[in-house]
Each structure stands twice: as structure tokens, then as C-alpha cells.
Amino acid sequence: MIARRSGATRLPRVTWLPAARRSLRELLDFVGTHAFGDAHVRERQIEEAIESLRHAPLRCEVAGVRDGLTFRRLTVVGRFLVYYVYTPPRGMTSAGTISIRAVRHAATQNPFLAVRESLAADQPHAVLSTHDTTPAIA
């Protein structure tokens, strides 16, 4: 028997790493302490931008490749950067996955360096950090 096609386009699901949720909370706490922005409005803008990724997950520029994963950067309102990894569909039952890795303010100096892999605790070499390459100050 042939399965029916509903005609509805399957969109990738969005998942958040715990570190990404923390980075969003930290960013919103920072925004909330300054007069330049409303944290609730910024959160909604970021969430809407992430939701829009589901329709075209490959549209954003590549920020880097690490351990076989391609990290992409979504810019929201010109100030906020969302780093994510898109995993394409596998088979007919999957629509792919967008894995949110970090949310940073654009003013952060090289914000990609703080993006960590989900297995970073098990594999210290998978951590992207300035601490690994910066020599100690004597």
C-alpha cells in the first residue's frame, strides 16, 4: 500500500542546547539592565527569527566548521547573533533539525569562540575557546 501525501511541507524541528538557553537568558538579562531595549521584545524578535529559519535553514552565512559540523550565524535586528547547526533530513520521516548552539550580542568580540559542542564535557578538544590559544601573561 502506498502512503498518502498530505501536501503539507515538513519543516525542520528546532532544538536548543542547554548552553544556548543559558546564553539567551544571559543576553536578555543584559538587555534588561540597559535602557536601550525591552528584553521581552528582544526575546520575541529572536524567537521569530529562529522560527523563520525553519523555512530556509541554509540561508544564513557559514560562521565556521568544527568537528564536521557547519555552524551558521543568523543576525537578528543587526545586534544579536544566533549560532546554529542544520542537520538535513534523513529518510522520509524526518524533516531535518536546526540545533541552536548560542545566542550572543554582536558587540561581543569574536562571539563564535564561545560556542561549544554538546559533547564538549566529554571531549575537551571540541571546546572552542580563547583560553586554549591565548598564552598566559607573565
Image: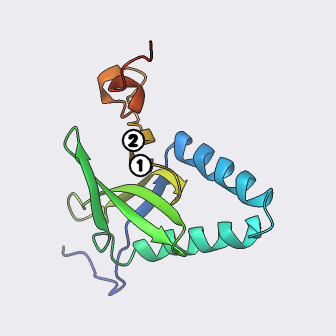
Q: Residue at x 42, y 42 (%)?
A: 115
Picture layout, residue 128 above or below residue 9 = above
Q: Would you say 39 lies left or right of 101 here? A: right
State the mark number for residue 113: 2
Give, as a three-letter code, the residue at label 1. Answer: Asn
Asked whether residue 33 is in view, the answer is yes
User: What residue sits right under mark 1 in the picture?
Assistant: 110
Quick one: label 1, few (<14), some, or many (20+) residues within 10 Å?
A: few
Q: Would you say 108 lies left or right of 69 here? A: right
Residue 68 coordinates in the image, percent (x, y): 19, 43
Asked whether residue 123 is in view, the answer is no
Q: Nearer the viewer, residue 75 or 53?
A: 75
Q: Give the residue at the far front of this rendering.
A: 138
Asked whether disc 1 touches disc 2, contact meaning CB atoms under 8 Å apart, the reply is yes
Quadrant location, the C terminus: top left
Q: Residue at x 72, y 60 (%)?
A: 31
Picture layout, residue 116 above or below residue 16 = above
Q: Quadrant of residue 12?
A: bottom left
**Disc 1/disc 2 C-alpha distance (Å):** 6 Å
Quadrant location, the N terminus: bottom left
Q: Would you say 32 lies left or right of 70 here? A: right
